[in-house]
Amino acid sequence: MPARDDQDFERRRQRIIDGALDVFASKGFEQATNKDIADAAGVKSPGLIYHYFKDKADLFRQVIEQHAPTVALLNQGDALLELPPRQLLMLIGNAFIKTVDNRRTVAMIKLMLGESLRRPAVAQMLNTIGPARGFALLTRYLEHQMELGVLRPMDAGAAARCFIGSLVGFVMAREVFPQPDSATLSAETMVATAVDVFLGGMLVEHSSTAGTIDDTGD
């Protein structure tokens, strides 16, 4: 059982992470100050934040890792490469949807995307935490499955974008440009459909029968 000091350390560290999420969601990364975060976390001195985190960027990474299931999934690394295609794609899809189902996380991501367009350093930081790792892992996985003969050979990077793009499109059509069916199209249906459509075009066993011509003359 952790010593009392360890428990107090983790409890205070968690309060800072929770407070930082609220501040990042309302002000973005650049505008959030240590004082804002300390006030939101109920910490008396802003300087105490550096006792728990290296800097504001480190704190931001910790916030993302804790509140973004996609990043937690990526931390499993090479173990994911051995999963069957449907299982891995469902894991990625469900983790992505869980991330954007958190309203505070969505608010933070919206602000961060806006900042990323104006500040390349913020874009690079955000990309390093999640998107770059996600695309790299999925591309490696697809290449591996192509080498095994499970998936059709094609540009793995383009294929990865096709799958991730379908999930991003779902979120955009719900959060930014709401469509008539946004309230009724469930995340579960979207993920399952995206996986079915993707594998329908990628699996070798499907492509061997797709597009066959009936030569019976009927």
Image (cartoon, rainbow, N blue to C red):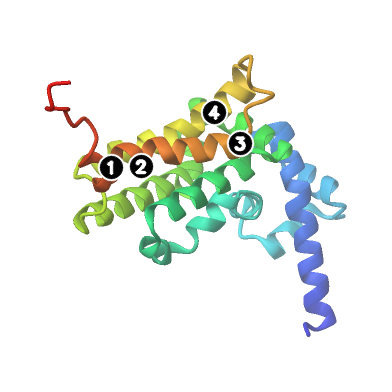
SS at mark 2 in the image: helix
Q: Earlier in the sequence, mark 1 or mark 2?
A: 2
Which of the two discs, 1 and 3, sits closer to the camera?
1
Residue 196 lies in what quarter of the image?
top left
Would you call the spot at circle 2 few (<14 residues within 10 Å), some (14-19), or many (20 or more)? Answer: many
Report if the CB atoms under discs 1 and 2 are less than 8 Å apart.
yes
Residue 215: x %, y % from top left: 12, 27
Q: Which mark is residue 97?
A: none
Would you call the spot at circle 4 few (<14 residues within 10 Å), some (14-19), or many (20 or more)? Answer: many
Residue 141: x %, y % from top left: 33, 54
SS at mark 1 in the image: helix
Q: Residue at x 19, y 45 (%)?
A: 153
Residue 154 lies in what quarter of the image?
top left
Task: State whether residue 109 is above or below residue 15.
Answer: above
Q: Which residue is mark 1?
A: 206
Q: Earlier in the sequence, mark 3 or mark 2?
A: 3
Q: Earlier in the sequence, mark 1 or mark 3?
A: 3
Disc 1 to disc 4, C-alpha distance: 25 Å
Report if the CB atoms under discs 4 and 3 are less than 8 Å apart.
yes
Residue 49 lies in what quarter of the image?
bottom right
Which quadrant is the N terminus positioned in? bottom right
Q: Which residue is mark 4?
A: 170
SS at mark 4 in the image: helix
Q: Which residue is mark 3?
A: 187
Q: How many marks?
A: 4
Identify the amino acid type marked 1.
His
Report if the CB atoms under discs 3 and 2 are less than 8 Å apart.
no
Identify the amino acid type marked 3.
Ala
SS at mark 3 in the image: helix
